[in-house]
Image (cartoon, grey):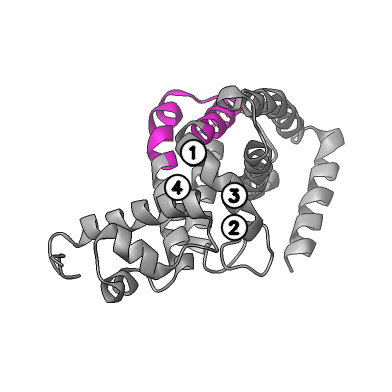
Amino acid sequence: MAEPSPGSRGSDRTREVIVETALRLFRERGYEATTMRAIAAEAGVSVGNAYYYFASKEALIQAYYDRAQAEHEAACEELLAAEDSFAERLGGVLREWVRVSDPYHEFAVKFFKHAAEPSNPLSPFSAESSPARDSSIAIYQKVVEGSRDRMDAELRAELPELLWLMSLGVVLFWVHDTSEGCRRTYRFIELTVPLVDRLVGLSHLPGLRGVARDFIAGVHELRS
């Protein structure tokens, strides 16, 4: 069987073929029923070479996370360069996530139960998922940093991670969305973003600054 060695110029292409094959088999057969041997056979590589690139099925999912995150970041570049309204930046980033994730919707529906397990390395909160998580939070950092809207300084510092947590709610809604073109998810974003924008916009007012501080203190306590 002809295949590029891991150190050859074709190694990136080999990795991509393995990831694409794995995602297809996960959709078709389910995550549990798909073995590394089956992935290697379908991808046209040896089992040993498949394990060279990816030590486990979990590593393949982490590669999918990283690729999906890179696609989302690229899709948001033009929006974040053009908009300086917090609401427009946040809403646009969330809508772009839904758009770039559309090809993976069927897979996500079947796979979600694994990512939802707290102890699973595929959880968005796991140590293994930290590169994709950090990259996602970085996008929301850009949302905040490029916004012209006034907001409480302490809340501004905490907001990227809080917005990432909010985005997980959008992901959960999207996973269960059976409407055509995920129309209900887009509507969910349309309804939710103005509420977040209003709360953030009020955070600098004297009467609500104390509430914002109490909220941030609670977040710190939950982290410890």
Q: Position of residue 10 (x, y in %)?
A: 15, 59
Q: What element carries label 1?
A: helix
Q: Which amino acid does label 1 sit on?
A: Ser
Q: Mark 4 points at which residue?
A: 69
Q: In which quarter of the image is residue 189?
A: top right
Q: Name the residue under label 1.
A: 101
Q: In which quarter of the image is residue 173?
A: top right
Does the magenta portion include 68?
no
Q: Is residue 88 left or right of residue 220?
A: left
Report, in whole angstroms, how far the alpha carbon at label 3 lies from the one at label 2.
16 Å
Q: Residue at x 74, y 69 (%)?
A: 224
Viewer-nearest of labels 3 and 2?
3
Q: Is residue 17 left or right of residue 89?
A: left
Report, in whole angstroms, how far the alpha carbon at label 1 lies from the one at label 2.
16 Å
Q: Name the residue under label 3.
A: 110
Closer to the chain start, of discs 4 and 1, is 4
Report, in whole angstroms, how far the alpha carbon at label 4 lies from the one at label 1.
10 Å
Q: What residue type is labelled 3?
A: Lys
Q: Position of residue 27 (x, y in %)?
A: 49, 49
Report, in whole angstroms, how far the alpha carbon at label 4 lies from the one at label 2.
12 Å
Q: Do the residues labelled 1 and 2 touch (CB within 8 Å)?
A: no
Per the rendering, the mark at residue 124 is 2
